[in-house]
Structures are given as C-alpha cells and as structure tokens.
Image: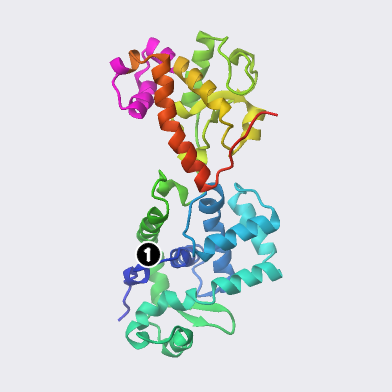
Amino acid sequence: MIDFNINNVFSNTRNSYKYYWWWSIIDICREKKVIDVHFDEIIIKIISKVWYPVNYYKLSFGKIDQCSKLVKEIKSKYNLEDNIKEQDLYKFLIQHRDSEFIIKITNELTRYVPYRFIRPWYSAETRGLKDSIVNSEILKLQNGRAPYIIEPNSKKISINKEWLQWICSNYTLIKAYTLFKLIRYLERENPNTVNLSKKLEKPTTRSLIAPTKYWNKFIDYDPNQIDVFERRPLSSIEDFSLDHFLPWSFFTHDLLWNLHPVDKKINSSKSNFIPKRKYFHRFYSLQFKFCKFLLDVQNDNALEHYYNLFNCSNDDLQNLSKEKFILEMNKFYMPQYEIARNMGFEDNWRLN
C-alpha cells in the first residue's frame, strides 16, 4: 500500500531545495500529467519559482542555501531584471538549457535533492549510512513506494502512477501544505519581513483606482501642494502615477501612507529603489497635508489606513500636530528603511 504522507520529507529542513523540488514536481504533474520528467525541466521550474522571492522581494534563504545562491548567479551572469516576466524567464532558461552554465547548475542541484527527497520512504534501510553511499543505496532500494523512481543515467525521474493520480486529484491541498511548510522555513530566515505569503510568487495585478481617486481630489482641493521629488506643484504633473515611497515589493500593499503622486517617468526610473534620505521629510510633510485633507472631508475608509498605522482614533489624528505627525512617521519608517537596506534593496535613489 502506498504511503502518501509527505510530512517526514520536510522535517529538520535546513535548505529550501526540498520545498521547491516538490512544488515544481506537483506543478509539472498537474500541467502535463506525464510520468517521465527530466532533471533540467524541474530545475528550470525551481529557478522560475525562486526568482521573485530572491531577486524581487529580497528574501533571505539562509547562508547555506544553494537554490538562492545559484539564482543570484544566473541573474548576474545574464544581467536579467529583478522583475522579468515569469514566462520570459522560463523561455530564456529553456533556450539556454544546453549551455555549460545551466548544465552546471542543474548538476549541482540534482546531485543530492532527488535522492534526499525520497529517503524518508527508505529511512529504515538507510539509517546510519555514510552520506557518501546514501544515493547508491536508494537506487538499489527503489521499489515504487516513493513518489518517483530515479533514473540517473537518463537524468530523469519516473513518477509513480498512483502518486500522479493522487497529486492531480489533490493538487490544491498538496500545494497549500507545501507552501505552508515553506513559509515556516522562510519565517526563521526573515523574522522582520511582513506579508511573507505574498512574496512566494510573482506579484498579481494590482489596482490603484481608489488611492488615485483620493489623491486627485486632494490635488483639486489644494493644487499648489509640492511633490516630493521635483519640488513642483502637484497640479502641474500632467501624467502622474502613484509611487510607493518604500518599494511595493518590500511592503506588498497599497496603503495610502506609503503612496504619493509623481510623474510616470520618475516612477519608472525609481522602480524598486529606496529614495535618498533627504526625501523622507518632504514625504512626511506631504503625507501630513494629505491626511488632514482626508480628515476635513471625513473620508473614513481612507483614514482607516492612518488609524491602523498610528494605532489611534479619529480624535487622536485630528489633534496630531505636524511636528508630531512627522515624528511618528519617522519612528515607523526608519526601522523599515534599515530592514529594507539589510534585505538588499538598493538605497540612495535620487532624481538626476
């Protein structure tokens, strides 16, 4: 009888590779419903999945983790963008799958993981063995109990038919469990990072319709307010967009206290960078005036963002002086600024 319990696979895990190896396999099973899967196809899936958490969201995978290290090497080697489209990245990797560099990475990531992943199904027979002979012993023991059989000469795995059926029938639950375990692993490495669950995959399409409406009303109300970067009236910006003052990929939300209007070209130029420190006070000042406007027009939906940020009531916010508002904003932003820098977000962006 097949034991479909995968819980033991993720016990005492010190690297991310098991999570991404399994996640990639179940995705391939669901998409293609195939039995035979080549190593390089799984590795390309892994790279595509690790790309955004490592390069875009700047998550730490731990000092000894190989997946994140090799993904950074690929980015550097080919000079790829942090936010390259997933389909473009996948297509690029497929085109380069026979290159010496990608073959080297495939060989490195498949030296142990295919064997170590299925070891729990042969735990009794491999307990206490020297690490150097575990792989060869697992090859001898393979009997269909585990999710797949390894075929090292052809560099592929063959999925057990019963496992394939189980994966396809229970894909949503299996993926949810795998991501839950992955998040628990990443929490240990990123204790100060918010919204980890949103940072495992490529960002979804976001809508800034409501925040844009609020800022448009503010500009109509006070057209001479000065923008943060160019120091010109907001009403003079013909084609504006809302910039996330600290990058969206850091906070992964569109709350009003991190938004402000800028020219679209400037927003594109700033991209995923942290602005220079000189801009922070200007941003706080504009935010104070915007918040006071929301209080004047009694927009409770928008004000909720500030109530939660300052942990205060409407009356508290009404009575907050400009100096106190700026002080509270700075008390919040400076630790976030340091965390973002330590995670690897580039800072000191300024308008040329």
Inspect the magenta stretch and tell me whether residue 240 lies in it: no
Residue at (45% x, 32% y) in the render: 333
Report whether 38 appears left or right of 331.
right
Q: How many marks?
A: 1
- Quadrant assignment for the C terminus: top right
Residue at (41% x, 48% y) in the render: 196
Report whether 96 appears left or right of 180.
right
Q: For the magenta stretch, what is the residue range?
A: 291-316
- Image coords of residue 238 (percent x, y): 65, 18
Inspect the magenta stretch and tell me whether residue 305 lies in it: yes
- Quadrant assignment for the N terminus: bottom left
Q: Residue furthest bottom?
A: 140
**Under tag 1, what secondary structure?**
helix
In this rendering, the answer to whether 177 lies above or below 132 is above
Tell me the residue that label 1 is attached to.
Answer: 169
Residue at (35% x, 60% y) in the render: 177
Report whether 89 appears left or right of 206.
right
Q: In terms of depth relative to the viewer, which is nearer, 116 or 142? A: 116
Give the main secondary structure of the magenta stretch: helix
- Image coords of residue 180 (percent x, y): 36, 56
- Image coords of residue 321 (percent x, y): 38, 14
Local packing at callout 1 (Cα closer than 10 Å; few below 14, some 14-19, many 20+) is few
- Image coords of residue 207 (percent x, y): 50, 32
Asked whether residue 181 appears in the rendered view, the answer is: yes
Asked whether residue 252 appears in the rendered view, the answer is: no
When asked about the image quadrant of residue 316, the answer is top left
Q: Which amino acid type is marked by label 1?
A: Ser
